[in-house]
Amino acid sequence: MTQPITYSGWQSEKSGYMGRLSGPGFALVAVACALLLTPVNLSSWAAAAVCVPLALLLLLLAFGRVSGLSADEWILLAVRHQIAVARKQNIFFSGPFAPRSARTGHQPMDLPGTLARLRILEAPDGLGGLLGVALDPVAGTYSAVARVSFPGLALVDSDKQAARVSSWAALMRTFCTEDSPITRLSVHQRCLPDDGAALRSWTAQHITADAPAAAVSALADVMEGAGPAATSRETYLSVTLSASRARLAIKGAGGGQVGAAAVLVRELHALGGALSTASLQVVAWLSPRGLAQTVRTAYDPDAQVALANANSAAQIPGWEGTEVGVDPALAGPVAAETGWGTYRHDGAWTVTYQVRTWPQAQVYATFLQPLLRPRRNARRSMSLVYEPLGPRRARQELAKEKSKRSSARHLRAKTGRDESEDERREVNLARTQDVARASGQGVVRMTAVLSVTVTDLEELETACAEMQADAAAAGLELRRMWGAQDVGFAAGALPLGQGLPDRRTGF
């Protein structure tokens, strides 16, 4: 029997201003050094009594770390959050409650926070339908979202598991080119209680008129009890096109938003064969109303059942004119509030985590399964964000990574400090990645964002503890996105392909 293949080699980015110090942290160290030299220059014990404690405090703020963040990063997060609270920027109202702009007199978009700049466009999909495109005018990106199905890995043998993982890696490799207009791919999966609407619709269409009343009643009772107890999973794949990378192609397609949408549709058609090879079946590319529905049900979990029933009714004869989905103008929440560690939206509370550390040991292809384990008290969402790097940038990033780690290694040797196994492993891993890149493999930036949502505040901390326990079982270390829960919700609970920051930021 073939032994299952294991995987490893994830490496955290190091992008400190100086070593592992951020810009403010480096400034704190510089001021501390100046304070330590002041008593020497003045030859004064009184100055030493004042300057030395202050210098030690600044060094503690720069080098001390709590939950992976330094003290200066915590201070910046707290100050930014308190400014938002003082200016009431952490509270969002939509519809008639939304404040009008003093300059234009118009109300803002229906999405809060960083999503307010998004626009949901419609474009012909080339097959007679409409494609929903999420435009981010600030980042200059156009994203399309598909609902996909996947045969899974848990119930197949190790050879098929390895083949499916390899096919997904090959798909990623096709975008690791200099001229690829696709800048980001995101896989979003949410685990939520099954509303039973599809089951009820199928049953209503297949029950004959002469069916025994007792049998119909018994079947209704079974569905009523089993539907809410079951769970279902929805999987989405978002593909993001960069307008700057594809500017020539967009200009050739007519320019502007119309040209960008045409280029994106062309890329999606070219992607179809690669997705099939990777064992991904596209159920449907979401229309504008379908894309808005996925956003709406994330903000308001209680709307899941009502919308599912409405969509099922649209398939019943006599109701063909009923539109499926949600009007994009109504996709957002009625109200939302960003707290220090939670995000409240339309009667639900969400806590979002970012994966801080991936497994250091060898793991199997199914190691992420515990994260979406069905829970009755909460719904979970996970977004895996991939940003393929072109050969030139990959070479620069890996060379920078190697030089940083080599410099740190030489500095430790000069100071006589022993090298730990973790530091030795990081150096070897950086060298191995550079060798793999030189041999033709692709390099991808990647992160995962996890969200847990409840409709009962008393169950929130229990649901968070269960999420952290399941993450530990998967070998992951999570970090709660303190002070940035609204941004985390946009990335982890919505399939809109929100990307990675260009530089590592503290949250």
Image: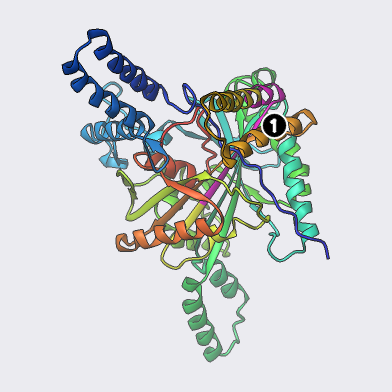
Task: Name the kind of residue labelled 1 in the image.
Answer: Arg
Number of other residues with Cα within 10 Å of mark 1, as a class: few under 14, some 14 to 19, many 20 or more: some
298 in the magenta segment:
no
Q: Nearer the viewer, residue 25 or 167?
A: 25
When asked about the image quadrant of residue 178, the answer is top right
How many badges with numbers are in the image?
1
392 in the magenta segment:
yes
Q: How is the image coloured?
A: rainbow
Q: Identify the magenta region.
A: 382-398
**In the rendered image of this protein, does residue 102 appear above or below residue 66?**
above
| Residue lying at 40% horizontally and 60% vertically, measured from the top left | 465
Q: Position of residue 9 (x, y in %)?
A: 66, 42
The quadrant the N terminus occupies is bottom right
Residue 459 visible in the current orientation = yes
Q: Nearer the viewer, residue 201 or 55?
A: 55
Q: Position of residue 293 (x, y in %)?
A: 49, 50
When asked about the image quadrant of residue 426, the answer is top right
Circle 1 SS class: helix
Left or right, 239 with respect to 471, comes to: right
Left or right, 360 with respect to 452, comes to: right
